[in-house]
Amino acid sequence: MKLISVIVPVYNLEQYIVETIQSVLAQTYKHFELIVIDDGSTDKTAEICEEFQEPKLKLIRQRNKGANAARNAGVRAAKGDYIAFLDGDDLWFPEKLAKHIEHLEQSPEVGISYSQSAFIDEAGNPMGLYQMPKLTDITVRDVLCRNPISNGSCAVLRQEVFEGIKFQDDLYGTAEDFYWDERLQGSQDLDCWFRIALKTDWKMEGIPEILTLYRVNSHGLSANLLKKQESWEQVMEKTREYAPDEVAQWENPARAYHLRYLARRAVTLRDGMTALKLCRQAIATHPQMVLEEPKRTGVTLVAATILSVLPTPIYQQLEDLGMKVGGWFQKRQIFQYKT
């Protein structure tokens, strides 16, 4: 059986980490190692991890350097043929690893296998909404513009994928192998996926099943959307250095889709004016997005417009109704995938 290294980066997640670890230990595929990287937590996260009497679990403690430094430490320590990441507040369904192993073993050209995800709130309650990315025929444009992998807890990768993108740096005074770029100030996930898509021949492919529970944490939503845009621009500038032709071809649509994503985050933060401004910038940057994705673009524009003119309580009622309708359509789509 192939060994899977499950890497869980954590920082001050004492309220979630037990449930997250239990969701890994409950996997039907049992040949895995669980590497928890405590990134300098100041609460009881590390102590809680140490209380598990589980030989599969290895706890590595380091000073606080950020989630991607924790991921790098986990990859360096990993012994598995496959590597999976799980954020310390997200959860997996029990068949998660088994499904991905089956997918990867049957598809030798696929380097990254990912799944659909269901949203849960901070208390772990289902929100009735899902991340349903494109699953097959993933192109460079898909990766640059739409991030089909969706979130960091839904992918399982071959170890060889990381060998194909690693680089050396002496960021902390000693030369080490790096996989996630710790010099970036944000959007490191995108940088990693970009390098895999542009520097290797591995395919990305998804499983049409909900296997990950992705927690929507209001404390994780940054109110400083400008910094998110700046970090994205930083990643694009880096990408331009090694893939100038691809960036030149897809930069405008990629920027537009990222601006629309930020507009949706502004809606979540109840900042209607900022959401409307970002949505207008997105459409002006790449007007074709209205035809390419009319539903998502239209919903974002309408939500931003209504939020900017209506009182928040009234908007909340409309949003609740919209989420119920949207969730119903997503469930129909999931059923169609299965049948």
Image (spheres, rainbow, N blue to C red):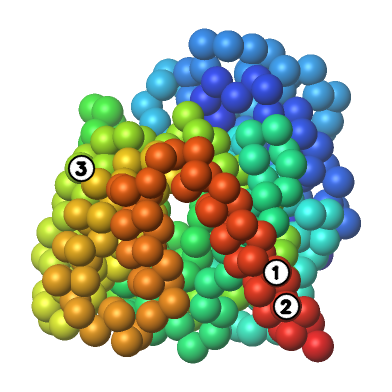
Identify which amino acid the numbered label 3 is placed on.
Answer: Leu
Check residue 332 in the rendering and tell me which mark sits there, or answer none.
2
Identify which amino acid the numbered label 1 is placed on.
Answer: Trp
> Do residues under tags 1 and 2 come within 8 Å of each other at their CB atoms?
yes
Of residue 162 and residue 282, the one placed in the foreground of this image is 282
What residue would you read off at disc 3?
226
Q: Residue 292: x percent and y percent?
A: 34, 85
Of residue 39 and residue 161, the one placed in the foreground of this image is 39
Q: Residue 155: x percent and y percent?
A: 58, 61
Q: Left of 69 or right of it: where is 251?
A: left
Q: The C terminus is located in which quarter?
A: bottom right
Residue drawn at x 38%, y 80% as measured from the top left: 294
Residue drawn at x 83%, y 54% as measured from the top left: 94
Between discs 1 and 3, the one toward the N terminus:
3
Q: Quadrant of residue 182?
A: top left
SS state under label 1: helix
Q: Left of 71 or right of it: where is 228?
A: left
Whether 101 is drawn above or below 245: the answer is above
Residue drawn at x 72%, y 83% as measured from the top left: 337
Of residue 200 and residue 155, the one placed in the foreground of this image is 155
Compute the Cα span from label 1 to label 2: 6 Å
SS state under label 3: helix
Comparing labels 1 and 3, the label whose residue is closer to the camera: 1
Whether 69 is drawn above or below 129: the answer is above
Check residue 328 in the rendering and tell me which mark sits there, or answer none.
1
Whether 260 is drawn above or below 269: the answer is below
Mark 1 nearby-residue class (10 Å; few <14, some 14–19, many ≥20): some
Between discs 2 and 3, the one toward the N terminus:
3
